Amino acid sequence: MKLKFILGKAQNNRQAILFKDLQQQITQAPDDQFIWIVPNHLKFESEVSVLKTLKSQKQMFATNQVQVFSFSRLIWYFLRNDPLYQSPQLTTTTQAMILAKIVHRLAPQLHLYAGEANRYGFIATLQDQINELITGNVTAERLDQLTQEVSKTGDLALKLADLQLIYRSYQEQTQQHYSDQQQLMQLLNNYLTTDSQQSHFHYLISGFSQFSAQETTLLQTMISHAASVELSLVLDHPYSSQQESIFFQRPRKTFIDLFQWARQQQIPVTTQIATEQRVCADLAQLEDFWIAQNTNIAHYPSTQLQDPSAIQIWTDTIAQKEVAAVTTYIRQLVATQGYRYRDFLVLARNLDDYRQFLEPYFTNQGISYFVDLQHSMKDHAFKDLIDSLFALYQNNLQYTDVMRFLRTELVIPATMTVAQYRQAVDLTDNYILAHGIRAADWLNEADFTSESLNSQLQTQLQQINQIKSLIKSTYQSVVQIAETAGNCRQASSQLYALLDNLGVFINLKKWEQTAIEAGNITLSQQPQQIVKTFAQLLDEYVTIFGEDQFDVSEFLLVINNGFEQAQYSTIPSVLDSVHISELGMVQSNQQLITIIMGANDLDMPLVNTNNSLLSDDDLKVLHPLLQDDERLPETEQQLNSNEPYLHDIGFLSSQQRLIFTYSSTKSGNEVHLSPYVELIKEHFNLSEQVLDCIKSNNEQQVLRTVGSPTITLNHLLEIYRQAQDQHQEIPPAWQSIHDILFANPDNKAYLDLLWSSLYYQNIPQPLTNTISQALYGDHLIASISQLETFYQNPYEYFLRYGLKLQPRAEFKITPANQGTFFHEVMDQTIKTLQDNHQTINQLSAEQLQHLSTQVIQKILSQKQYQIFSRSEKFARQRMIQTAQSSLEAIRQQSRSAEFYPYKTEIAFGQVGALHNIEPLRYQLNDHQDVVVRGRIDRIDRLLSNPQDYFVVDYKSSKHDFKFSEFYAGINLQMMTYLASLINDPSLFDGPAFALGGFYFQLQDPTVKFEDLKGHWDDYQDFLFKQYKYQGIIIDNGKTAQLLEPHLTQASQIFPITKNYKIRGQKVVSPQEFTEMLHYNQFLIKQAAQKILTGDNQLSPLRQDKQTTALQYSDYLPIMQFDAMLPENNYRSLESIDKKTFFKKLNQPKEP
């Protein structure tokens, strides 16, 4: 019965004293048992170290005589045969389930936490709080007492009252059915108290700076009954209760508490100060300075390092380059200086900043590594499968849930390969979007069908129907579980059987095998652990809720909480591996070199936050009220004041070198060197080593960047690219690296591929004659909108109409199907009138609305318009209102201006189309021509002069004829429509003369009060003006009078003033119109010639600062257009008026 403290700074070799004492004790008591207790995450590494050290001493001992345990493993060692230990253990997942159920049940009695049970993360926070109370020896009864002692004015009393209710109920439900950590620790304490063999046990404890209340009680029992207890603490010297230490506050408190207790119990206490250095002289100086700096010593003289490599500071631009530099350094030292991977420790205060880069860079550099952090199971595909499985039922087979379920790839039928399944799922994805598949469609007995006889489509439908069958049967099974299973036990059994029938467990086994074959041992362990965890969750769920009525939401809450708490168990797959961990965790101190990444002013020091239910203010009130054997967590202030001590442990975690690295940016924002490291930098007169390869020119600097072939090539590419951009010479050292790298034939093909990126330019290759011929032939048939697309961006024309690439169809209301709907309403309404030998101006407003309603209902009943019947009623009603308002405007216009719709939807150049007129056909050369096809929305004729007509083009937004757009070739429709009617006037019974072409906006306009300027009664006139025709008028001197003969004021229909004047930019003479037709023909032929000769330039047009040809393009991911690249440039639309336009026609140029 004796206690020995082994004290010393982090620089001192306390471990050596423990080993020496252990060897002496084994010699003196060869039949005794020796147990070394360490933190759980150090158990594996410590066990290897202890056994290795003892064997190196060539001392005879039984392998089971010395054990390395964590506290939890110590419980197993002594209590594994005890009935309490063998009873169901309260796992974190069981605990979460019990607490969730308790909060639901106690909701009416709770003051603050009644509605919190369903809030994401609350149960986990509550669980942490309950565990803190348990480990702190704070009972439910004490909570009740504390509730009475605190002030009733704040919410602390209400918090404590709620926690007391929950805590008491929790203890009632667990103590009779489970063995939890509290019970087991108490049982172990009782066991050690009564075990007569304890006098033959020796305990050595290291790696701790503080203990929980339960652990402290256990230590006291060990000290009282064991042969000896030795405790190693990072503490510079023994402290009395009157001596304070800002720096060593945690280990100081631990030392004083145990020392005073032992003295009170009259137990012999000895203290030994470790003096042997375990680190190099420079690191020892670093710690001395660091302690002095953080204990208010006014001045500590600066010094120089004995070994300049002992403490280094590296900086780079981004975190990715930081990791590249770290892995290159490790690779080089292992290759050239005899180091092993296990000699390196990589730390970061916030390891999440680097997690995405660790695997690719360490793997690429060929470095074995182990990340010493627990990983939650909550993001595994199996958990996603469970969620999506019940989401199918809860959300009635919504698209996102169906695809989420299928994309887990855990339900691949045995008859399908992975590739076949993925293709079937992709096809199903497209089919759902294109056809708006809903629950009724999935559950229909009939398969999905198509009227097309295309054999490829029929084959694809077979694949889609396989997925349909899977979804249907799965949904029905889930419905049966949710609605007819009865109690939770039956539902759990049926769910497990469903997963088995779906092949989920078989597919997980395949994942495991694939990972093994790939050599990824860590990944291969996950499927088995997932299944084991799920089975355990179901067992615990049945134990707690077994006979209760099954509730899907409650079940998912339980499963979610369970997986949230579940962690993968991981150990290093190989002994010789780089250890990666977070700064702040105790390390084994076996490594030689520590590299601390992220040494910036945001993360070093870390600003700790308290996220528990008891706030900092609550803890400040409660701490003074606690008894000696009770503990509560530290406040934020206490946690933050411990940061220097935690960093000291990290700084001195290795023996030879300490390297700080940081990047100058984080999340796009500038960061700076940590103030902690800045102090070290100033004290040792260190300089920051810039690792950016761009700034490495001499041979020594360049050699530091040489890693694996791929990593080295990345640096080379950066160097050569900068030299290209800045027209510089490549430094000789980099040229040598290039020659050596590409001289190796093993990786040459892969390296050549990467190297080609250096000369890549985002410029499409012109099409060869062979490819152009295969795509377009010699006879180009194109619509005028296609040719406009070419003038907007030739490359988009090639993608859309050459390769015929299309974005996947989606079953939703789009501008395209809205436009089709409006056009058909206009067309069918006017045709119905013509069939009845009526014109629109003969109808009253009520008659027109009645007629249009009938037409609209007939149109909406067609299959192609079912999207409108399935969508929101408001959107559908707005479309109907827009169509009817526009028809009413046409009725009023035709009555005021004496014109009427003559023909609608006139197709030209389309075989078999109604009212077909001859296409525009232009010969390009002796073997190539272009045929222009299109559809004219409407032709109106004048009542008084039937030989006169004008063309109307429907638009869904404001539109007008602009000479600059026509000149550039992006507004050819109106001229082409007029040209087609002149080319084939067969629609008319005699000579016909064009008066112009106009745009009519389909709309349901609104009016603002300020627009009326106080004339409230004029709102109808204001609305009517919004339908005014915009476009181009062909004026022979009488056109204005023909269009609106009874004009007494400015026209509300056409751009004509009350004096029959037409705005200059809106009118052309017949001669000018002829010139425009010739230019229109020139543009068509020019576009056709360029298309047929393979012109596919990536040359988008910019119309103004806000509008470009790429603005609404579906092909941006393919084009990869970047205006910052020198080879990618917009063509600017030249702004010209009518006068300039006709002047330019005398010398036509390519737009």
Image: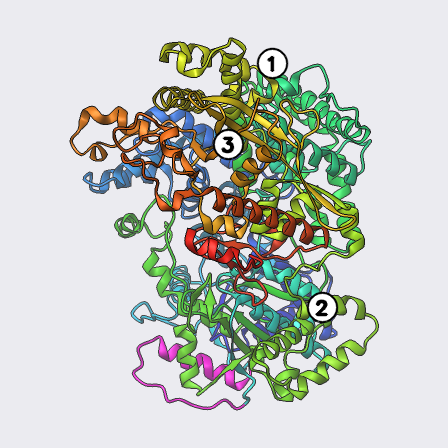
Residue farthest to the left, as pictured: 1014
Q: Which residue is mark 3?
A: 993
Nearer mark to the viewer, of 3 and 1: 3
Is residue 299 shown above or below 488?
Answer: below
Q: Quadrant of the C terminus?
A: bottom right
**Residue at the (64%, 71%) spot, across then down:** 327
Looking at the image, residue 306 lies above or below residue 826: below
- Residue 756 is labelled as 2
List x then y, in percent, for residue 1004.
Answer: 37, 27
* Residue 143 visible to an observer of this rendering: yes
The secondary element bearing badge 1 is classed as helix
Q: Which residue is label 1 attached to?
A: 484
Mark 2 neighbour class, 10 Å CA radius: few under 14, some 14 to 19, many 20 or more: few
Labels 1 and 2: the sequence-earlier one: 1
Total tally of numbered discs in the picture:
3
Locate residue 221, reporting x and y percent: 49, 54
Q: Secondary structure at mark 2?
A: helix
Quarter holding residue 112 = top left
Amino acid type shown at disc 3? Phe
- Mark 2: amino acid: Ser
Horizontal and vertical percent position of residue 736 = 72, 85
Which is more N-terminal, label 1 or label 3? 1
Q: Closer to the camera: disc 3 or disc 2?
A: 3
- Taking depth in this image into account, of 707 and 943 the one nearest to the observer is 943
How much space separates mark 3 and mark 1, taking CA atoms? 76 Å
Task: Provide the residue span drawn in magenta.
Answer: 280-306
Pinpoint residue 838: horizontal percent, then vertical percent.
Answer: 47, 11
